[in-house]
Image: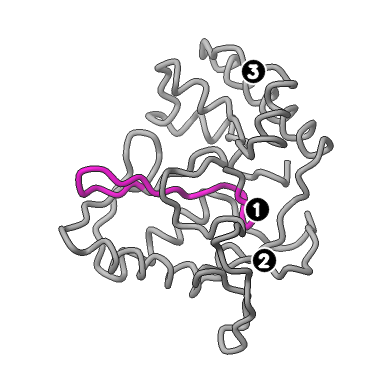
C-alpha cells in the first residue's frame, strides 16, 4: 500500500518468530511499522506538543495541512532503513541484511510488543514519516513510470536480462487505484533475477522506488 510519509515503505513481515524490515517498492507487508492511512477504525492524527509532531496510533505522520515540497529535506527509503537499523541496534536488537536488501531480526517469544514499541520510538525520535507526501495523481504516475523504464534500460545496459515492465496503464491503475508502487527491482526479483547481491546494480541504476515522489 502507498505510504505518503516517506519515499518507500519499510514493511514488517512476521513468520516463525522472525521479523523482516524490508524496503519493498512502496508496498506494505501484512503488518506495517509505518502508520496506515486513516480508516473507520483508525484514529485521526493528533498533534503532540511535547514531541512537536503529529501522531497517529503513536506513529509520526505528516501535518494534515502540509503540502508536498520536492525541494524540502526528506529521506529516501534506504536512508530510513539505515536509521532504523542503527536505532534498533543501539537498543539491543540484532539486525542483519537479508538477500533482498531488507533487514531481519529474530524476536524471542513474548517480545513482539517490546520490539514494536522500540521500533515506534525509533520512528518518533528520528521524525520518520513526517514529510508531506506527493499527491497521488496521473502526473506522479507518469513521472514515476518513466523513471522505472529508464532504470530498466540502465540495467539492460549492464547486461542484465531484465523482464518486461508492466504497461503504463497497469502501473497507473496499481498506483492510483490500489496504492501499489511497482518497481523493476520487484519485477526482476519475481523472475528470479538477483539485483541485490552486487551493489553495482543499485549504485549504477538505483531503484526509483527508493526516492519515490522525487524522481
> Is residue 118 inside the magenta stretch?
no
Query: Furthest-left residue in view?
Result: 109
Q: Please give the residue where the numbered disc 2 appears in the rendered image.
A: 62
Please, what secondary structure does the residue beneath circle 2 have?
A: loop
Q: Looking at the image, do the residues carrying marks 1 and 2 touch, with CB atoms under 8 Å apart?
A: yes
Name the quarter where the N terminus is drawn: top right
* 98 lies left or right of 123: left
Mark 3 residue crowding within 10 angstroms, few (<14) / some (14–19) / many (20+): some
Marker disc for residue 4 = 1
Residue 211 lies, with reference to residue 48, above or below; the image says above
Magenta residue span:
3-20
Tell me which label, 3 or 2, sits earlier in the chain. Answer: 2
Query: Furthest-right residue in view?
Result: 139
Mark 1 residue crowding within 10 angstroms, few (<14) / some (14–19) / many (20+): many
- Residue 84 location, x and y as percent? 42, 60
Q: Residue at x 28, y 69 (%)?
A: 114
Which picture quadrant has residue 150?
Answer: top right
Marker disc for residue 166 = 3
- Residue 175 location, x and y as percent? 68, 35
Name the quarter where the C terminus is drawn: top right
Residue 22 lies, with reference to residue 88, above or below; the image says above
Residues 81 and 182: in front is 182
Residues 97 and 68: in front is 68
Please, what secondary structure does the residue beneath circle 1 have?
A: loop
Q: How far apart are labels 3 and 2 at the CA level?
A: 31 Å
Amino acid at each position: 500500500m502507498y505510504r505518503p510519509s516517506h519515499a518507500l515503505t519499510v514493511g514488517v513481515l512476521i513468520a516463525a518468530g522472525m521479523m523482516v524490515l524490508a524496503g519493498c517498492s512502496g508496498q506494505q507487508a501484512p503488518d506495517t511499522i509505518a502508520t496506515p492511512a486513516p480508516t473507520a477504525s483508525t484514529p485521526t492524527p493528533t498533534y503532540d506538543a511535547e514531541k512537536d509532531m503529529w501522531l497517529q496510533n503513536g506513529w509520526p505522520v505528516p501535518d494534515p495541512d502540509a503540502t508536498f515540497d520536492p525541494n524540502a529535506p526528506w529521506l529516501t527509503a534506504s536512508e530510513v532503513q539505515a536509521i532504523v537499523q542503527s536505532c534498533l541496534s543501539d537498543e539491543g536488537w540484532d539486525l542483519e541484511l537479508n538477500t533482498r536488501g531488507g533487514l531481519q531480526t529474530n524476536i524471542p517469544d513474548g517480545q513482539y510488543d517490546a520490539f514494536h514499541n522500540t521500533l515506534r520510538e525509533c520512528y518518533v525520535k528520528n521524525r520518520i514519516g513526517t514529510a508531506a507526501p506527493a499527491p497521488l495523481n496521473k502526473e506522479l504516475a507518469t513521472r514515476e513510470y518513466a523513471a522505472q523504464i529508464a532504470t530498466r534500460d540502465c540495467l539492460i545496459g549492464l547486461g542484465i536480462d531484465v523482464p518486461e515492465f508492466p504497461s503504463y496503464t497497469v502501473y497507473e491503475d496499481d498506483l492510483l487505484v490500489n496504492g501499489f508502487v511497482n518497481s523493476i527491482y520487484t519485477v526482476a526479483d519475481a523472475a528470479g533475477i538477483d539485483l541485490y547481491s552486487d551493489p553495482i546494480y543499485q549504485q549504477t541504476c538505483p531503484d526509483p522506488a527508493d526516492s519515490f515522489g522525487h524522481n
